[in-house]
Amino acid sequence: MWVTGANVALLTDLYELTMAASYLEHGMNHPATFDLFVRHLPANRNFLIACGLDDALAYLEGLHFDNEAIAYLRSLGLFSEHFLAYLQRMRFTGEVWAMAEGEAYFPEEPVLRVTAPLIEAQVVETFLLNCLNFQSLIASKAARIAIACGERQFVDFSPRRDHGADAALKAARASYIGGAAGSSNVLAGRVYGIPVSGTMAHAFVMSFEREMDAFVAFARTFPDRATLLIDTYDTLEGARNAVRTAKLLEPEGVRVQGVRLDSGNIAELAAGVRCILDEGGCDHVQIFASGDLDEYRIAALLAAGAPVDAFGVGTQLGVSADAPALGGVYKLVDDAHGPKVKLSAGKRTLPGRKQVYRIERGDDSAHDVIGLEDEAPPAGGRPLLQPVMANGRRASAPGPLVAARERCRQALDALPPRLRALEVIVPGHPVRYSGMLTRLLEVETARRTPPDRPTV
C-alpha cells in the first residue's frame, strides 16, 4: 500500500483525531495558531536548511477524508457519527506563514506558522512534522556536503539505502535544494526535474570476460558521457584499461568522460589514477569518487590534495547518518483566548504569533530576532516568515526547484564563516527575543506558575 492523495489524511497520529473529536464535542473550534520549530540543533550542526514546504502546502490544499477513510475510522469504534460527518466535509481553510525553502534557520525560530480553526490546525500536525523534519534534515546534510566540496560537485546516490520509497524521492529533492548537482534517482528526475546521473555497477564489468571489453561496450553505448568504474579488480590497472579504451575508441568519435573510484584508499588511488590518465594523454578524463563518503571524508580528501573532481554521496546523505533525526515540534502558541505557553521542563515554548528577523552583517555581529507579529521590526531586520497560504489556498504557484537551491547557496554564503565549519561552534548563531516577546513570556510564565513556586 502506498501513501496517496486519497489516503494521506489518515497519515496522522491517533491522538490528533481523539483530541479533535473532543474539541468538536465541547464546541472548541475557534481559530488557533501553531508554530513548527526545533528546540535544539542536531549533533554536529551549526544551522538548518528549511525544506519540505511545497509538499506541505500541497497536502493542506488537498486534505480530505474520503469514504474509505471514514469507513475505517468508523470500524475503530472510537468516534461518533457526528464527528465522522464533520471529518468527511472538513477541508483546510487556514493560513500559513513560512520560511522559504532553502533558507537557513536556528533553534526556537518558527519555520512554519499555521492559523486555522483548532481542529484543522491540530489534525495536520503529524504530516507537517514528518514532511518538514525529514526534508530539512536531508537538505541540511546536503548543505554541509556542499560546503566540504567547495567548487566541486556531488550527486545524491542514496535511494537504495534510504528508509523507504517516499524517503528516496524526498531525499533527492532535499539534496538538490541543499546543493547536490543531481541524483541517481530517475523518478526524482521525472517528478522534480532534477538532473539525473549514473555510471555503471561492478556487475556490468564482471558480466564481460575482460574488464576492457566492458569499458569498450559501455563507451560505445554512451559515446559522449561514459564514466568507467575502474576498481572491480585492480584500480590502477583499471585506469590503464580506461586509457586503452579511450585511445581505441577515439577514432570513432567516442570520448571517455570520467572514471569512478568506489573503494580503497581514495586519496592514494586518485593520485595514482591521475598520473596514469595524464601520462596516457587523457588529462580531460575526470575522477569521480564514491563509497560511503560524507562531508568529513570529502573534506579530508580535498585537504590531502586528492585529485578528485566530483563525488557521489549515498548512505551518509540519504539517512543523515551522523544525525539521523530532527526533533522539530508543532506547538499551540495562540488562540481566541490569547497567547499560550508551555512550561514543561526543558520544553518551554514562546507565546504569541511571531515573526523572525535576520540581521545580516557578514561578520560575527549577525544575529536573528524573534519578535511578536504586530511589533515594529528591528533596524535592518529581514522578515523570514512570509504568507504562503490563505483560506486554504496557496498564495502563489510553486516556484522552480532551482530557485530554492540558489536561495540555499545564498543563505550559506551569508552565514558568518565560522558557522560554515563542519565541527560544532560554541556559541552558535545568536537568536534573541524582542523586548515585547520577552515581556509577554514573563507575563504568561507568571500567570501559569503557582504562587508558591518561583518563575524561571
Image (spheres, rainbow, N blue to C red):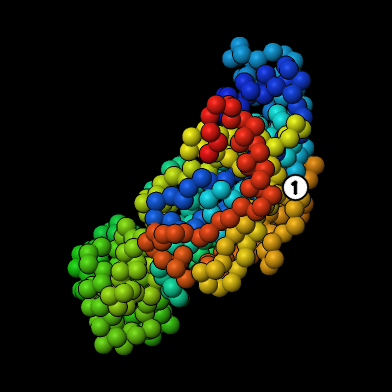
The number of discs equals: 1
Label 1, secondary structure: give it.
strand
User: Which residue is located at x 54 percent, y 68 percent?
Assistant: 365
| Image-based side of 58 in relation to 326, left or right | right
Depth order, front residue of 115/381: 381
Query: Where in the figure is residue 100, as x and y percent of width and height?
Result: 64, 57
Depth order, front residue of 29/346: 346
The answer to whether residue 348 is seen in the rendering is yes
User: Which residue is located at x 30 percent, y 78 percent?
Assistant: 305
Q: Residue under label 1, please give it.
A: 389
Query: Where in the figure is residue 390, as x and y percent of width and height?
Result: 78, 45
Query: Where in the figure is residue 145, as x and y percent of width and height?
Result: 42, 63
User: Which residue is located at x 58 percent, y 55 percent?
Assistant: 432
Does residue 350 sit above or below 293 in this rendering? above
Q: Quadrant of residue 401?
A: bottom right
The disc labelled 1 sits on which kind of residue? Answer: Met
| Image-based side of 326 in relation to 118, left or right | left
Q: Quadrant of residue 206?
A: bottom left
Depth order, front residue of 67/250: 67
| Image-based side of 256 in relation to 25, left or right | left
Number of residues whose C-alpha sits closer than 10 Å to that of mark 1, classed few (under 14), some (14–19) or many (20 or more): many
Query: Where in the figure is residue 427, as x and y percent of width and height?
Result: 44, 59
Q: Residue furthest right?
A: 391
The answer to whether residue 153 is seen in the rendering is no
| Image-based side of 436 in relation to 173, left or right | right
User: Which residue is located at x 62 percent, y 57 percent?
Assistant: 369
